[in-house]
Image (cartoon, helix red, strand yellow):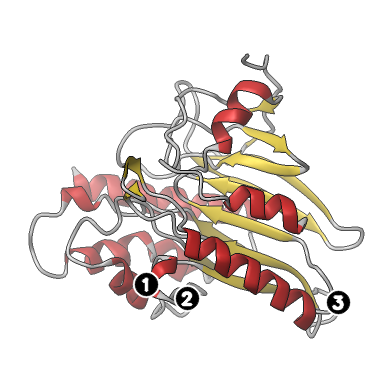
C-alpha cells in the first residue's frame, strides 16, 4: 500500500511539473512522514529517493525547508539537509548557525535579461518541530532566525544594489495566519483551523518592517489552501500534494500552488494547479468574523 501511494505521488508530481513547466520548485516540508519509520537503517534516504524521483526526471531546480515530521525517522534535520544537498538539482542549503534551524537559507534569482542582475530572492525558513520557548504546541521560526533575516536582508540590499522583492516559504504558519483567517478577505479553502507556531517570534513583523516580502506561503494544514493580503503581503497556504496523510479539502484535487512572476514591471500572480492539469483560480468566499 505504501509503495502504491508513493508511486501515485511520483506520477502526480510528474504531471504537475509537465502541466506548468516551472523554473523552480519550493517544498514546504513534511515530504516524509517520519512517524511511519519502520526502524530499518537507511529508511529516510530510501524515501528521499522516492519523492525526488520526478524532480530528477524533469530536471527542475528546487529548495526544501523541513516540516515537523521529516526528522522523526533515522536522520536529524542537519543530516536531511546534507543528504538533500547531494541532489544535482537541489539548491537547499544548511543554515548558517545551529540556532537558525537546519533549513533556513536564501536563494537569489537572476534576471532573464541580464544573468548578472539579481531581481528577487527566495527565502526558506525552518519552523522546527514542537514547542517554542517552552510553550507547548508546534515549533516556530526562532528569534535567532529573525535576527539572521534582518542582518541578511540589510546585507543583500547593499550587495544587490537595492532592496529586491522576496518570496518566503516555511512549514508551520505564523500566528498572523489566525488573524488573516478571521479578519481578512481571502480566496480558497478555509477547511481546517490554523495550527500555527506556538509563539509569535516577530518574523512577520520583520517582513512588514523591511518592506521587501511580496508573498509568504506555508504547508502544515493539509485542508487549507487559502490566500489573503496581509499588510501588502500575499500570505496563505499551498495545496496538499502527496497521497500520504490527510487532505486536501473535501471535493478538491491534490495539486500545488503556482507563483508566476513578471520581471518588468514586477508583479505576482498565484493560483492552484490541480492533479488533472486544470487551474483552480479560487473564487473569493465570504470572510469569517
The answer to the question of whether label 1 and label 2 lie on touching residues, with beta carbons closer than 8 A, is yes
Near mark 2 (Cα within 10 A), the count class, few <14, some 14-19 or many ≥20, is many
At numbered mark 3, what does the secondary structure look like: helix, strand or loop? loop
Residue in view at x 68 percent, y 33 percent: 228
Q: Does residue 246 appear to the left or right of 54 in the view shown?
A: left
In depth, the one of 64 and 150 nearer the eye is 150
Q: Distance from label 3 to label 2 (Cα)?
A: 26 Å
Sequence-wise, the earlier of marks 1 and 3 is 1
Say the numbered circle drawn on residue 130.
none
Residue in view at x 52 percent, y 43 percent: 174
Q: Is residue 78 above or below residue 286?
A: below
In depth, the one of 52 and 86 nearer the eye is 86
Q: Which residue is mark 1?
A: 81
Q: Is residue 262 above or below residue 41?
A: above
Report if residue 213 is visible in the image.
no
Say the numbered circle drawn on residue 113.
3
Residue 197 picture location, percent across and down: 44, 42
Near mark 3 (Cα within 10 A), the count class, few <14, some 14-19 or many ≥20, is few
In which image quadrant can residue 185 be found? Answer: top right
Residue 196 picture location, percent across and down: 45, 38
- The N terminus, quarter of image: top left
Say the numbered circle drawn on residue 93.
2
Q: Does residue 169 appear to the left or right of 39 in the view shown?
A: right
Amino acid at each position: 500500500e505504501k509503495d502504491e501511494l508513493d508511486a501515485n505521488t511520483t506520477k502526480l508530481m510528474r504531471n504537475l511539473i509537465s502541466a506548468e513547466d516551472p523554473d523552480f520548485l519550493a517544498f514546504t516540508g513534511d515530504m516524509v512522514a517520519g512517524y511511519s519509520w519502520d526502524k530499518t537503517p537507511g529508511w529516510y534516504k530510501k524515501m528521499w529517493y522516492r519523492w525526488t524521483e520526478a524532480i530528477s526526471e524533469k530536471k527542475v531546480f528546487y529548495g526544501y525547508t523541513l516540516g515537523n515530521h521529516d526528522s522523526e525517522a533515522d536522520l536529524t534535520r542537519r543530516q536531511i539537509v546534507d543528504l538533500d544537498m547531494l541532489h544535482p538539482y537541489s539548491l537547499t542549503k544548511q543554515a548558517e548557525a545551529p540556532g537558525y534551524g537546519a533549513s533556513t537559507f536564501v536563494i537569489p534569482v537572476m534576471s532573464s535579461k541580464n544573468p548578472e542582475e539579481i531581481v528577487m530572492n527566495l527565502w526558506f525558513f525552518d519552523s522546527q518541530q514542537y514547542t517554542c520557548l517552552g510553550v507547548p504546541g508546534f515549533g516556530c521560526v526562532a528569534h535567532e532566525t529573525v535576527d539572521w533575516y534582518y542582518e541578511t536582508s540589510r546585507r543583500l540590499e547593499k550587495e544587490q544594489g537595492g532592496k529586491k522583492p522576496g518570496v518566503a516559504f516555511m512549514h508551520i504558519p505564523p500566528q498572523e495566519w489566525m488573524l488573516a483567517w478571521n479578519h481578512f478577505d481571502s480566496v480558497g479553502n478555509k477547511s481546517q483551523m490554523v495550527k500555527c507556531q506556538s509563539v509569535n517570534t516577530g518574523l512577520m513583523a520583520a517582513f512588514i518592517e523591511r518592506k521587501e516580502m511580496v508573498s509568504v506561503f506555508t504547508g502544515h494544514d493539509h485542508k487549507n489552501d487559502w490566500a489573503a493580503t496581509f499588510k501588502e503581503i500575499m500570505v496563505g497556504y499551498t495545496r496538499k500534494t502527496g497521497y500520504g496523510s490527510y487532505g486536501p479539502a473535501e471535493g478538491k484535487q491534490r495539486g500545488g500552488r503556482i507563483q508566476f512572476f513578471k520581471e518588468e514591471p514586477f508583479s505576482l500572480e498565484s493560483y492552484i494547479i490541480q492533479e488533472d492539469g486544470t487551474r483552480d483560480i479560487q473564487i473569493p468566499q465570504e470572510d469569517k468574523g
